[in-house]
Amino acid sequence: MNALSHTTTNVRPLGFTNWRRIFATAGPGILIAVGYVDPGNWATDVSGGAEHGYALLSVILLANLFAMVAQALCVRLAITTGKGLAQHCREQFSRPVAMGLWVLAEIAMVATDLAELVGSAVALKLLFGINLLPGVLVVSAITFTLLLLGGNDWRLRGLVCMLMTVVAASFVVLLYMAKPDWWQVAAGLVPTRELVANPSMLLIAVGIVGATVMPHNLYLHSGLLAPLGQKLTSSVRPTALKAAALKANLRDSNTSLAGAFFLNAAILIAAGAVFHSHGLTEINDLGAAYTLFDPVLGSTIAATIFAVALLAAGQSSTITGTLAGQLVMDGFLRIRVSPLVRRLITRLAALGPALLYFMVAGESDSARLLILSQVVLSLQLPFAVIPLLLFVASRRLMGNFVLGRGAKLVAWGMALAILALNMFLIVQMMM
């Protein structure tokens, strides 16, 4: 399966009444949005909701706005130039710099896969009692099977959509059972000074940013749309067609990410309503959350719904992570491998830290490993965002589609905010 074939985007002007055309542009955005609801998000959202109620909803909202801006820049870069972020890094930077960025991208891939691996293994343990050590091996076998089933573009999209539908339906049911105070939920969307004054809140906040704006999604989105950009560049009316394609794919991206925001918010709201409102503020493990869902809600199926959604989220995120790994290797190294080979490379790299952690620290603190993986992703993020900003701000590369002054200020402000959060986190961890 060729990862670069996942763009069958129709570049004609689209109207919302033409559902066939709208659906034709839905592939890349759906695949990108999956990365924003992976198990790493669950760990940070459950921990944040249990400890701080709805206060961190503002961070999820802010991180999602960051994600929309970042993914919009990926769309602009790919459709305008016909090249992905990884390929531009290889061509525009010196070889040592490009190789350094490749290594950092691979570290981000491993951190992403680690969260998906551990989260899915936790779900198997909750559902079937499989210990985490053998569970990570079972999860890997499931992943390879799903990749074999997803033999073409539309089948893969359908598989991912099915898994995400399971996640969405599960949290609709959980929120109905939890009955959160929606006025307090609305108040949580407004940021407070405590977000930076409270070290505990800041650590989870940075983890949420790392779990939301993910480095591999920048490489994935731009790489998926690059073939479309190449096709438009060689067309008869490239400027007009590129403008139409930009509009269509930005709508696809923003709509999909809005859905991802509601799913992330639902996880935190459920944790706040079920645990924080009942004084259970020390829920730092997904297993502990699973154990308490039924007795707190007085239900016999709430915990099972939670675990099934967790497994579906982990498996859908693994599929998109495999595609991102293919595009990173192709862009930086000009090496194309099959999805199964790429999955084997990344999964083996993630298995080592996971197995070592469980053997040394035991299986009772998996949430800490998940949250640390998201912090690693947040620390890696500037090394993908800053090159992206440099490229889309270059008139030599972008021509008439170069970012305007206002857009540049917004984008660089976002990047500087992420850098500031990361530096503050490092200082806090060293103190």
Image: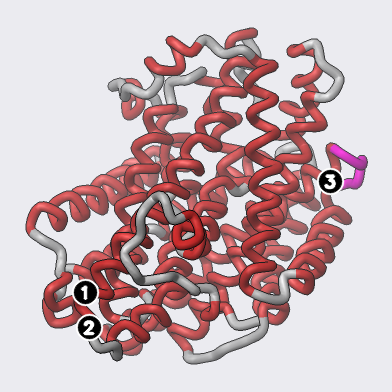
In magenta segment, residue 355: no
Kind of residue indicated by mark 2: Arg
Q: Residue furthest right?
A: 129
Q: Quadrant of the C terminus?
A: top left
Q: Position of residue 123 (x, y in %)?
A: 78, 43
Q: Is residue 114 visible?
A: no
Tell me: residue 350, above or below residue 375. below
In primary-sequence order, the first of circles 1 and 3 is: 3
Q: Is residue 333 left or right of residue 274?
A: left
Q: Secondary structure at mark 2?
A: loop
Kind of residue indicated by mark 1: Ala
Q: Position of residue 338 (x, y in %)?
A: 67, 84
> Which residues, given as a range, are shown in magenta?
127-131
Q: Quadrant of residue 250?
A: bottom left
Along the line of sight, which residue is nearer the eye, 216 or 131? 216
Q: Position of residue 405 (x, y in %)?
A: 7, 58
